[in-house]
Amino acid sequence: MELSDIFREFGAEYIQKFGDKIPQNHLKAIRDILACRTPQMGGQTYYCEECEEYHYSYHSCKNRHCPKCQHEAGQEWLENQMDLILPVNYFLVTFTIPGELRSIVRSHQKLMYSILFKSSTGSLKKLSLDPKFIGGEIGMVGILHTWTRDLFYHPHIHFIVPGGGYDKERNVWHKANHKFLLPVKALSKIFRAKFQDEMKKKNLLYSIPKVVWKKRFVTHSEPVGKGETVIKYLAPYIYRVAISNSRIIKMEDHKVIFKYKDSNSNEWKLKTLDAMEFIRRFLQHVLPKGFQKVRYYGFLGSASRETFEKIKHILWYKRKVTTSKNKKVLSKRKPDICPKCGNRMILMDTIPRHKRAPPKLLRKTLIIYMKELNLQRLMKA
Protein backbone atom coordinates (compact mmCIF):
# COMPACT_ATOMS: atom_id res chain seq x y z
CA MET A 1 0.00 0.00 0.00
CA GLU A 2 1.42 3.39 -1.04
CA LEU A 3 0.42 7.02 -0.83
CA SER A 4 -0.02 7.05 -4.61
CA ASP A 5 -2.68 4.30 -4.25
CA ILE A 6 -4.69 6.58 -1.95
CA PHE A 7 -4.46 9.49 -4.37
CA ARG A 8 -5.40 7.20 -7.24
CA GLU A 9 -8.48 5.95 -5.39
CA PHE A 10 -9.68 9.14 -3.69
CA GLY A 11 -7.77 12.02 -5.30
CA ALA A 12 -10.44 12.90 -7.88
CA GLU A 13 -13.09 13.04 -5.16
CA TYR A 14 -10.88 15.28 -3.02
CA ILE A 15 -10.22 17.70 -5.89
CA GLN A 16 -13.90 17.83 -6.86
CA LYS A 17 -14.90 18.40 -3.23
CA PHE A 18 -12.54 21.29 -2.48
CA GLY A 19 -12.07 22.71 -6.00
CA ASP A 20 -10.41 26.12 -6.17
CA LYS A 21 -9.59 26.04 -2.45
CA ILE A 22 -6.73 23.61 -3.12
CA PRO A 23 -3.40 25.48 -3.51
CA GLN A 24 -1.45 24.93 -6.71
CA ASN A 25 1.51 23.40 -4.85
CA HIS A 26 -0.82 20.76 -3.35
CA LEU A 27 -2.07 19.81 -6.82
CA LYS A 28 1.50 19.53 -8.08
CA ALA A 29 2.40 17.24 -5.18
CA ILE A 30 -0.56 14.98 -5.99
CA ARG A 31 0.40 14.93 -9.67
CA ASP A 32 4.05 14.11 -9.02
CA ILE A 33 3.38 11.40 -6.42
CA LEU A 34 0.89 9.73 -8.77
CA ALA A 35 3.33 9.79 -11.68
CA CYS A 36 6.49 8.84 -9.77
CA ARG A 37 8.26 5.85 -11.35
CA THR A 38 5.46 5.22 -13.84
CA PRO A 39 5.42 5.51 -17.67
CA GLN A 40 4.09 9.06 -17.12
CA MET A 41 7.61 10.14 -16.05
CA GLY A 42 9.39 8.41 -18.92
CA GLY A 43 12.35 6.07 -18.58
CA GLN A 44 14.14 3.17 -20.27
CA THR A 45 13.34 -0.38 -21.35
CA TYR A 46 16.09 -2.96 -20.72
CA TYR A 47 16.44 -6.61 -21.68
CA CYS A 48 18.31 -9.19 -19.60
CA GLU A 49 19.75 -11.97 -21.77
CA GLU A 50 20.41 -14.12 -18.69
CA CYS A 51 16.81 -13.99 -17.38
CA GLU A 52 15.31 -13.51 -20.86
CA GLU A 53 13.06 -10.79 -19.46
CA TYR A 54 12.32 -7.12 -20.13
CA HIS A 55 12.68 -4.63 -17.29
CA TYR A 56 11.33 -1.08 -17.16
CA SER A 57 13.18 1.67 -15.34
CA TYR A 58 10.94 4.72 -14.86
CA HIS A 59 12.18 8.08 -13.65
CA SER A 60 11.35 9.43 -10.20
CA CYS A 61 9.35 12.65 -9.74
CA LYS A 62 11.97 14.34 -7.50
CA ASN A 63 9.18 16.00 -5.51
CA ARG A 64 10.42 16.67 -1.97
CA HIS A 65 7.13 15.41 -0.51
CA CYS A 66 7.18 12.07 -2.32
CA PRO A 67 7.88 9.07 -0.04
CA LYS A 68 9.54 7.15 -2.90
CA CYS A 69 12.06 9.87 -3.70
CA GLN A 70 13.14 11.18 -0.33
CA HIS A 71 15.01 8.11 0.92
CA GLU A 72 17.27 8.36 -2.10
CA ALA A 73 17.66 12.13 -1.56
CA GLY A 74 18.61 11.48 2.06
CA GLN A 75 21.33 9.05 1.00
CA GLU A 76 22.75 11.58 -1.46
CA TRP A 77 22.75 14.25 1.26
CA LEU A 78 24.53 11.84 3.58
CA GLU A 79 27.34 11.29 1.10
CA ASN A 80 27.75 15.05 0.58
CA GLN A 81 28.10 15.71 4.33
CA MET A 82 31.30 13.68 4.76
CA ASP A 83 33.40 16.81 4.11
CA LEU A 84 31.54 18.69 6.88
CA ILE A 85 32.04 16.17 9.68
CA LEU A 86 34.03 17.42 12.66
CA PRO A 87 35.56 15.16 15.38
CA VAL A 88 33.33 16.59 18.12
CA ASN A 89 30.11 15.73 19.90
CA TYR A 90 26.95 16.74 18.04
CA PHE A 91 23.62 17.96 19.42
CA LEU A 92 20.05 17.92 18.17
CA VAL A 93 18.28 21.14 19.21
CA THR A 94 14.53 21.49 18.61
CA PHE A 95 12.44 24.66 18.71
CA THR A 96 8.63 24.52 19.05
CA ILE A 97 5.90 27.14 19.44
CA PRO A 98 2.67 27.15 21.52
CA GLY A 99 -0.38 25.54 19.92
CA GLU A 100 -2.22 28.88 19.78
CA LEU A 101 0.20 30.07 17.09
CA ARG A 102 -0.27 27.16 14.71
CA SER A 103 -3.32 28.54 12.90
CA ILE A 104 -1.60 31.82 12.00
CA VAL A 105 1.54 29.93 10.92
CA ARG A 106 -0.53 27.72 8.64
CA SER A 107 -2.30 30.77 7.16
CA HIS A 108 0.99 32.61 6.42
CA GLN A 109 3.33 29.69 5.83
CA LYS A 110 6.16 31.20 3.81
CA LEU A 111 6.41 34.25 6.09
CA MET A 112 5.98 32.40 9.38
CA TYR A 113 8.39 29.59 8.54
CA SER A 114 11.01 32.23 7.76
CA ILE A 115 10.30 33.90 11.12
CA LEU A 116 10.72 30.52 12.83
CA PHE A 117 14.15 30.09 11.23
CA LYS A 118 15.26 33.66 11.94
CA SER A 119 14.22 33.72 15.61
CA SER A 120 15.59 30.25 16.43
CA THR A 121 18.96 30.77 14.73
CA GLY A 122 19.22 34.21 16.33
CA SER A 123 18.66 32.64 19.74
CA LEU A 124 21.34 30.01 19.24
CA LYS A 125 23.84 32.55 17.93
CA LYS A 126 23.25 35.01 20.79
CA LEU A 127 23.58 32.49 23.61
CA SER A 128 26.54 30.66 22.07
CA LEU A 129 28.58 33.87 21.92
CA ASP A 130 28.25 34.25 25.71
CA PRO A 131 31.62 33.24 27.29
CA LYS A 132 29.71 31.54 30.15
CA PHE A 133 28.52 28.88 27.70
CA ILE A 134 30.59 28.58 24.52
CA GLY A 135 32.09 31.94 23.68
CA GLY A 136 32.33 31.54 19.93
CA GLU A 137 30.55 31.21 16.61
CA ILE A 138 28.70 27.93 16.15
CA GLY A 139 27.64 26.07 12.99
CA MET A 140 24.10 24.81 12.42
CA VAL A 141 22.04 22.82 9.95
CA GLY A 142 18.36 23.69 10.38
CA ILE A 143 15.50 21.46 9.16
CA LEU A 144 11.84 22.49 9.17
CA HIS A 145 9.23 19.84 10.05
CA THR A 146 5.51 20.57 10.27
CA TRP A 147 3.91 17.32 11.45
CA THR A 148 3.33 15.03 14.39
CA ARG A 149 3.55 11.28 13.93
CA ASP A 150 -0.20 11.05 13.39
CA LEU A 151 -0.12 13.87 10.79
CA PHE A 152 -1.39 16.77 12.89
CA TYR A 153 -0.01 20.21 12.05
CA HIS A 154 2.88 21.00 14.41
CA PRO A 155 5.59 23.28 12.94
CA HIS A 156 9.01 22.99 14.57
CA ILE A 157 12.67 23.21 13.62
CA HIS A 158 15.47 20.73 14.29
CA PHE A 159 19.08 21.92 14.35
CA ILE A 160 22.11 19.68 13.98
CA VAL A 161 24.88 21.50 15.88
CA PRO A 162 28.55 20.54 16.37
CA GLY A 163 29.41 20.85 20.06
CA GLY A 164 31.61 23.91 20.19
CA GLY A 165 32.31 27.36 18.77
CA TYR A 166 35.07 29.23 16.99
CA ASP A 167 36.64 32.29 18.61
CA LYS A 168 37.76 34.40 15.63
CA GLU A 169 39.78 36.90 17.69
CA ARG A 170 41.92 34.22 19.39
CA ASN A 171 41.68 31.65 16.59
CA VAL A 172 40.72 28.92 19.05
CA TRP A 173 37.98 26.33 19.37
CA HIS A 174 35.82 26.35 22.52
CA LYS A 175 34.32 22.99 23.39
CA ALA A 176 30.69 22.91 24.55
CA ASN A 177 29.47 21.05 27.62
CA HIS A 178 29.25 17.38 26.64
CA LYS A 179 25.86 16.94 28.39
CA PHE A 180 24.11 19.96 26.90
CA LEU A 181 24.99 22.46 24.23
CA LEU A 182 23.28 25.49 25.79
CA PRO A 183 20.84 25.95 28.73
CA VAL A 184 17.40 25.37 27.19
CA LYS A 185 15.45 27.57 29.62
CA ALA A 186 17.51 30.62 28.70
CA LEU A 187 17.36 29.61 25.04
CA SER A 188 13.54 29.37 25.19
CA LYS A 189 13.19 32.89 26.64
CA ILE A 190 15.41 34.42 23.97
CA PHE A 191 13.55 32.47 21.27
CA ARG A 192 10.18 33.77 22.48
CA ALA A 193 11.42 37.38 22.61
CA LYS A 194 12.94 37.23 19.12
CA PHE A 195 9.82 35.53 17.70
CA GLN A 196 7.64 38.28 19.21
CA ASP A 197 9.91 40.99 17.78
CA GLU A 198 9.67 39.49 14.30
CA MET A 199 5.89 39.26 14.56
CA LYS A 200 5.79 42.92 15.57
CA LYS A 201 7.90 43.90 12.55
CA LYS A 202 5.40 42.14 10.26
CA ASN A 203 2.42 43.78 12.02
CA LEU A 204 0.99 40.42 13.10
CA LEU A 205 0.92 40.89 16.89
CA TYR A 206 -2.70 42.10 16.81
CA SER A 207 -3.91 38.61 15.85
CA ILE A 208 -2.14 36.85 18.75
CA PRO A 209 -3.71 36.57 22.24
CA LYS A 210 -1.49 38.28 24.83
CA VAL A 211 -1.49 35.15 26.99
CA VAL A 212 0.65 33.41 24.34
CA TRP A 213 3.65 35.57 25.21
CA LYS A 214 3.51 34.35 28.81
CA LYS A 215 3.77 30.72 27.70
CA ARG A 216 6.99 28.83 27.34
CA PHE A 217 8.33 28.36 23.83
CA VAL A 218 9.67 24.84 24.34
CA THR A 219 13.27 24.19 23.34
CA HIS A 220 14.93 20.80 23.65
CA SER A 221 18.58 19.83 23.31
CA GLU A 222 20.18 16.39 23.42
CA PRO A 223 23.60 14.93 22.58
CA VAL A 224 23.48 12.53 19.63
CA GLY A 225 27.04 11.28 19.26
CA LYS A 226 29.94 12.26 17.06
CA GLY A 227 31.47 11.88 13.61
CA GLU A 228 30.15 9.89 10.68
CA THR A 229 27.85 7.84 12.92
CA VAL A 230 25.82 10.86 14.00
CA ILE A 231 25.41 12.11 10.42
CA LYS A 232 24.00 8.73 9.41
CA TYR A 233 21.67 8.82 12.40
CA LEU A 234 20.45 12.32 11.59
CA ALA A 235 20.13 11.90 7.79
CA PRO A 236 16.44 10.84 8.02
CA TYR A 237 15.64 14.17 9.70
CA ILE A 238 16.75 16.02 6.58
CA TYR A 239 14.53 14.47 3.92
CA ARG A 240 11.78 12.92 6.02
CA VAL A 241 8.24 13.36 4.67
CA ALA A 242 5.00 13.50 6.67
CA ILE A 243 4.34 9.77 6.20
CA SER A 244 6.29 6.94 4.57
CA ASN A 245 4.69 4.22 2.46
CA SER A 246 5.75 1.60 5.00
CA ARG A 247 3.44 3.15 7.61
CA ILE A 248 0.30 2.93 5.45
CA ILE A 249 -1.48 -0.33 6.31
CA LYS A 250 -4.59 -0.37 4.11
CA MET A 251 -7.61 1.55 2.84
CA GLU A 252 -11.15 0.24 3.13
CA ASP A 253 -14.70 1.63 3.44
CA HIS A 254 -13.51 5.09 2.43
CA LYS A 255 -10.97 5.08 5.30
CA VAL A 256 -7.19 4.93 5.52
CA ILE A 257 -5.44 3.00 8.29
CA PHE A 258 -1.83 3.78 9.13
CA LYS A 259 0.54 3.15 12.01
CA TYR A 260 2.49 5.63 14.11
CA LYS A 261 4.75 5.45 17.12
CA ASP A 262 3.25 7.05 20.23
CA SER A 263 5.67 9.65 21.62
CA ASN A 264 4.75 8.85 25.24
CA SER A 265 4.75 5.04 25.26
CA ASN A 266 7.09 4.61 22.27
CA GLU A 267 4.74 1.86 21.06
CA TRP A 268 3.27 1.44 17.60
CA LYS A 269 -0.43 2.30 17.32
CA LEU A 270 -2.99 2.32 14.51
CA LYS A 271 -4.85 5.41 13.34
CA THR A 272 -7.99 5.33 11.16
CA LEU A 273 -9.01 8.43 9.21
CA ASP A 274 -11.61 9.16 6.58
CA ALA A 275 -9.86 9.27 3.19
CA MET A 276 -10.66 12.97 2.70
CA GLU A 277 -9.24 13.82 6.13
CA PHE A 278 -6.13 11.73 5.52
CA ILE A 279 -5.41 13.54 2.24
CA ARG A 280 -6.09 16.92 3.88
CA ARG A 281 -3.71 16.16 6.74
CA PHE A 282 -0.97 15.04 4.38
CA LEU A 283 -1.28 17.99 2.02
CA GLN A 284 -1.13 20.59 4.80
CA HIS A 285 2.53 19.63 5.16
CA VAL A 286 3.34 20.43 1.53
CA LEU A 287 5.68 23.42 1.68
CA PRO A 288 5.25 26.66 -0.31
CA LYS A 289 6.91 26.71 -3.71
CA GLY A 290 10.60 27.55 -3.52
CA PHE A 291 10.78 27.48 0.27
CA GLN A 292 14.11 26.12 1.51
CA LYS A 293 13.43 23.63 4.32
CA VAL A 294 17.13 22.84 5.00
CA ARG A 295 19.42 25.75 5.81
CA TYR A 296 23.07 26.11 6.86
CA TYR A 297 24.25 28.76 9.31
CA GLY A 298 27.37 29.97 11.08
CA PHE A 299 30.64 28.30 10.12
CA LEU A 300 28.66 25.63 8.20
CA GLY A 301 27.21 28.28 5.87
CA SER A 302 28.38 28.45 2.25
CA ALA A 303 29.96 31.87 2.85
CA SER A 304 32.12 30.58 5.73
CA ARG A 305 34.21 27.89 4.04
CA GLU A 306 37.44 29.65 4.97
CA THR A 307 36.42 29.72 8.64
CA PHE A 308 35.47 26.05 8.50
CA GLU A 309 38.92 25.14 7.10
CA LYS A 310 40.53 26.99 10.03
CA ILE A 311 38.38 25.02 12.48
CA LYS A 312 39.41 21.73 10.86
CA HIS A 313 43.05 22.74 11.13
CA ILE A 314 42.65 23.63 14.82
CA LEU A 315 41.02 20.29 15.55
CA TRP A 316 43.71 18.47 13.55
CA TYR A 317 40.84 17.15 11.47
CA LYS A 318 41.50 14.72 8.65
CA ARG A 319 38.61 13.60 6.49
CA LYS A 320 37.82 9.92 6.81
CA VAL A 321 37.49 8.60 3.28
CA THR A 322 34.32 6.54 2.91
CA THR A 323 35.26 2.89 2.48
CA SER A 324 34.21 0.94 -0.59
CA LYS A 325 31.90 -1.03 1.68
CA ASN A 326 30.12 2.15 2.78
CA LYS A 327 29.93 3.40 -0.79
CA LYS A 328 28.21 0.21 -1.79
CA VAL A 329 25.65 0.69 0.99
CA LEU A 330 25.01 4.34 0.15
CA SER A 331 24.91 4.05 -3.64
CA LYS A 332 21.76 2.99 -5.45
CA ARG A 333 21.52 0.14 -7.93
CA LYS A 334 22.34 1.23 -11.47
CA PRO A 335 19.31 1.08 -13.79
CA ASP A 336 21.04 -1.20 -16.31
CA ILE A 337 21.79 -3.90 -13.70
CA CYS A 338 19.22 -6.70 -13.60
CA PRO A 339 17.32 -6.70 -10.28
CA LYS A 340 17.06 -10.51 -10.42
CA CYS A 341 20.46 -11.86 -11.49
CA GLY A 342 22.70 -8.79 -11.19
CA ASN A 343 24.01 -8.98 -14.77
CA ARG A 344 24.25 -5.96 -17.04
CA MET A 345 21.19 -5.52 -19.27
CA ILE A 346 20.83 -4.20 -22.82
CA LEU A 347 19.13 -0.84 -23.39
CA MET A 348 16.28 -1.50 -25.81
CA ASP A 349 14.27 1.73 -25.85
CA THR A 350 13.82 5.14 -24.25
CA ILE A 351 10.33 6.05 -23.03
CA PRO A 352 9.54 9.77 -23.47
CA ARG A 353 8.12 11.73 -20.57
CA HIS A 354 4.49 12.83 -20.93
CA LYS A 355 3.89 16.55 -21.34
CA ARG A 356 2.58 18.26 -18.23
CA ALA A 357 -0.67 20.19 -18.24
CA PRO A 358 -0.59 24.00 -17.91
CA PRO A 359 -1.26 25.22 -14.33
CA LYS A 360 -4.76 26.46 -15.20
CA LEU A 361 -5.76 23.00 -16.43
CA LEU A 362 -4.04 21.02 -13.69
CA ARG A 363 -7.20 20.32 -11.65
CA LYS A 364 -9.16 19.10 -14.66
CA THR A 365 -6.39 16.93 -16.11
CA LEU A 366 -5.62 15.41 -12.71
CA ILE A 367 -9.24 14.29 -12.27
CA ILE A 368 -9.26 12.74 -15.76
CA TYR A 369 -5.90 11.06 -15.16
CA MET A 370 -6.96 9.53 -11.82
CA LYS A 371 -10.20 8.22 -13.30
CA GLU A 372 -8.21 6.59 -16.13
CA LEU A 373 -5.85 4.98 -13.60
CA ASN A 374 -8.78 3.56 -11.63
CA LEU A 375 -10.34 2.20 -14.83
CA GLN A 376 -7.07 0.49 -15.77
CA ARG A 377 -6.80 -1.02 -12.28
CA LEU A 378 -10.38 -2.37 -12.45
CA MET A 379 -9.74 -3.88 -15.91
CA LYS A 380 -6.61 -5.66 -14.65
CA ALA A 381 -8.54 -7.00 -11.64
Image (cartoon, helix red, strand yellow):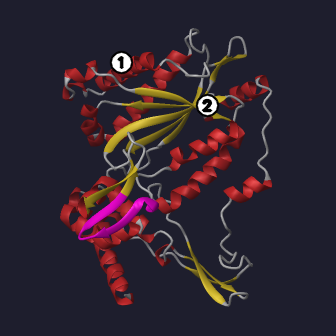
Instruction: Judge whether residue 255 is colored magenta.
Output: yes
Q: From the image, which quarter does the N terminus lie in?
A: bottom left
User: Measured along the vertical axis of the image, is residue 144 above or below residue 192?
Assistant: below
Residue 289: x and y in percent read 40, 50
Give residue 193's mark. 1
Disc 2 secondary structure class = strand
Crowdedness of circle 1 by 10 Å Cα count: few (<14), some, many (20+)?
A: some
- What secondary structure predominates along the stretch shown in magenta? strand
219 left or right, relative to 69: left
**Magenta range:** 245-258
Disc 1 residue type? Ala
The residue wearing badge 2 is 90
- At x 39%, y 62%, the residue is 248
171 left or right, relative to 355: right
User: Measured along the vertical axis of the image, is residue 239 above or below residue 39?
Assistant: above
Disc 2/disc 1 C-alpha distance (Å): 26 Å
Figure quadrant of residue 50:
bottom right
Residue 47: x and y in percent read 67, 86
Q: Is residue 361 visible?
A: no
Residue 67: x and y in percent read 47, 59
Residue 43: x and y in percent read 57, 76
Disc 2 residue type? Tyr
N-terminal-most mark, 2 or 1: 2
- At x 22%, y 27%, the residue is 208
Give residue 339's mark. none
Pick the residue in front: 312 or 246. Answer: 246
Disc 1 secondary structure class = helix
